[in-house]
């Protein structure tokens, strides 16, 4: 039986921290579906299609990773995909509080789906898309935080004070 896991997020943009969690999930499961969500509570810089394309570029060398997009309840996507688990990356205790609540809610809605938490490495435990956007917006160097293959695209979209 193929072990399928969903790795959901808004990925606006994907960071090296996200990439790390996806790579680790790809080493643990037969198939990883990175699902870009349309979160009505967020105002993304990149469209859902653009975010999916950035992830495809970052994960191009991972043959068991595919990228999709959705809006709605995550458990509905999990059921549709045939996945048995959801992988979530944790950076800090504050992430755990929120993600644990979501995991319990998802378990109540879909008891057969497990949530698996992967902790970030110390290199990326402070990193978030919002931090990357803020640094880029003011022309800071985001190269330590964003995969090289999408760096120029992210800088062009977000940086408002960059030199031409």
Image (cartoon, rainbow, N blue to C red):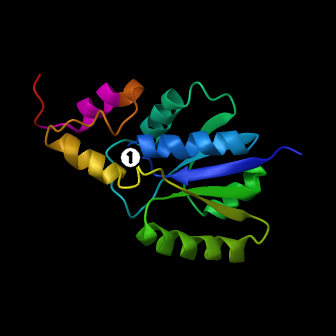
Q: Judging from the image, what secondary structure is the residue with disc 1 in?
A: loop
Which one is nearer the viewer's eye here, 109 or 147?
A: 147
Q: Position of residue 94 (x, y in %)?
A: 41, 71
**Where is residue 161 drawn, in percent x and y?**
10, 36
Q: Residue at x 55, y 76 (%)?
A: 101
Residue in view at x 44 percent, y 70 percent:
93
At 58% from the left and 47% from the top, the residue drawn is 35
Give the vertical position of 157 relative to 10 (above or below).
Answer: above
Query: What residue does disc 1 label?
Result: 12
Query: What residue do we see at 67% from left, 28% from top?
Result: 63
Question: Exactly how many numbered labels are in the figure?
Answer: 1
Residue 23 sits in which quadrant?
top right
Residue 68 visible? The answer is no
In the image, which residues are magenta?
Answer: 151-160
158 up-or-down from 75: above or below: above
Is residue 13 on the magenta stretch?
A: no
Judged left or right of residue 23, residue 28 is right
Say left or right for 72 vs 39. Answer: right
Q: Quadrant of the C terminus?
A: top left
Rendered location of residue 97, percent (x, y): 48, 75
């Amino acid at each position: 039986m193929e072990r399928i896991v969903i790795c959901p997020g808004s990925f606006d943009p994907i960071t090296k921290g996200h990439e790390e969690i996806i790579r680790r999930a790809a080493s643990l499961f037969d198939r990883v579906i990175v699902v870009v969500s349309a979160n009505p509570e967020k105002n993304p810089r990149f469209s859902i299609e653009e975010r999916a394309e950035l992830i495809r570029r970052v994960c191009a060398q991972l043959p068991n990773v595919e990228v999709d997009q959705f809006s709605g309840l995550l458990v509905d996507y999990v059921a549709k995909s045939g996945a048995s688990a959801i992988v979530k990356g944790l950076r800090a205790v504050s992430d755990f509080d929120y993600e644990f609540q979501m995991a319990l809610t998802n378990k109540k809605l879909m008891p057969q789906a497990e949530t698996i938490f992967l902790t970030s490495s110390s290199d990326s435990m402070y990193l978030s898309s919002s931090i990357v956007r803020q640094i880029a917006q003011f022309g800071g160097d985001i190269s330590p935080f964003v995969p090289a293959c999408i760096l120029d695209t992210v800088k062009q979209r977000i940086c408002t004070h960059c030199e031409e």
